[in-house]
Image (cartoon, helix red, strand yellow):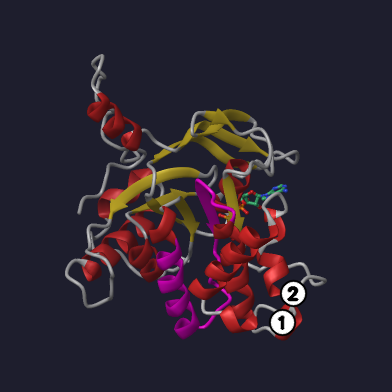
Amino acid sequence: MTAAQPGRDAEPAEVPRLEPNAPVVRRIAQQETPVLIVNDLSKTYADGTEALAGIDLKVRQGEIVALIGGSGCGKTTLLRLIAGLDQASRGAVQVDGETIRGPHPAVGVVFQEPRLLPWLDVAGNVGFGLADLRRAERRARVAAALERVGLAEQSHRWPRDLSGGQQQRVAIARAFVAGPRVLLLDEPFSALDAFTRKGLHEQLLDLWAEAKPTILIVTHDVGEAVTLADRVVVMRPRPGRLDETVAVEVARPRAPAAAGYEEAVRRVLAALDRSLRPVETRRDLTPEGRANWW
Ligand SMILES: Nc1ncnc2c1ncn2[C@@H]1O[C@H](COP(=O)(O)OP(=O)(O)OP(=O)(O)O)[C@@H](O)[C@H]1O
Ligand SMILES: [Mg+2]
């Protein structure tokens, strides 16, 4: 496990140079090419708030990256720009080489609140974006996704009759069923109790294991970041920037008792601590960090 230098983002390995007639090398190169590229992205809101400045980030196919940082450091702004829900002031986002100019079918989003359609039942909500599919295929895909999140028996219930955790499961199933290349999650579990949250981590990873979409998840929970992510990127505020990256090299499935888990948590906490200090005072900090960053 390594922590990158402040201001630097650990990027995927260089793509190998392709020789003619080298299909194997080409296949490897395609796997290594980042699915998501964020290039010099900045956002200043109309009232002058500089929410993001010069964000550079590359995320590989199937990689899970957690974004963590103090309140107001631009995490939601970054996700909204990647999702095409807002316009950047400068810079660009590409998914599979295509520039994002608005909401895109290759990019799925799960918000903190489930945002289900109250006039559709659970199956209707999950299948909402699949109108182009034939009925039988749509039903099969919806049923498989609901099975994965433990809601196979609830498919005809109404959103208002579900618990918060169940509603968020529906939102996650809805996001996965569309087969996104990039899935963005903005504090999807923060309103849930610790027990429900743990179950949802497992279900999220189960769903991810099928098609391995690239995932960018915002969280305030260091344990959640270390449980889920291959890389934890710490942001710093005013203006929002990427600060340090902590690579999490802990075997999956992960649990707090796993080798390297506690150390990863300590490193993320220390990086968070540094992210809240002016750059010039960082030298004085202990490498252990303190847990009072939020
Ligand atoms: N529509 C807006 N107009 C003006 N300023 C905004 C707008 N949306 C967000 N901001 C500001 O931009 C900055 C970044 O906000 P953002 O919501 O991206 O932060 P965040 O990291 O997601 O915070 P939190 O952890 O509290 O969710 C904040 O200073 C916020 O007040
Ligand atoms: Mg936010």
Q: Which residue lies at the image location 70% right of the left edge and 49% below the top edge?
A: 132
- Residue type marked 1: Arg
Disc 1 and disc 2 in contact, CB within 8 angstroms: yes
Quarter in which the N terminus is drawn = bottom left
Q: Which residue lies at the image location 49% right of the left edge and 72% below the top edge?
A: 148
Would you place residue 95 above or below residue 163 in this image?
above
Residue 39 location (% of width, % of height): 49, 30
Q: Which residue lies at the image location 52% right of the left edge and 83% below the top edge?
A: 193
Residue 143 location (% of width, % of height): 58, 70
Residue ID for mark 2: 121
- Camera-nearest residue between 55 and 28: 28
- The numbered dot on residue 181 is none
Q: Which residue lies at the image location 65% right of the left edge and 62% below the top edge?
A: 136
Would you call the spot at circle 1 few (<14 residues within 10 Å), some (14-19), or many (20 or more)?
some
Residue ID for mark 1: 157
Would you place residue 102 above or below residue 272 in this image?
above
Tell me where residue 99 sits by quadrant.
Answer: top right
- Camera-nearest residue between 36 and 221: 36
Classify residue 47 as left or right of residue 63. Answer: right
Q: Is residue 277 visible?
A: no
Would you place residue 67 above or below residue 43 in this image?
below
Classify residue 50 as left or right of residue 205. Answer: right
Would you place residue 41 above or below residue 196 in this image?
above
Q: Secondary structure at mark 1?
A: loop
Q: CA distance from mark 1 to mark 2?
A: 5 Å
Provide the residue span drawn in magenta.
178-207
Residue 11 location (% of width, % of height): 32, 37
Classify residue 197 as left or right of residue 282. Answer: right
Q: Secondary structure at mark 2?
A: loop
Is-magenta flag for residue 239? no
Tell me where residue 83 sits by quadrant.
Answer: top right
- Residue type marked 2: Asp
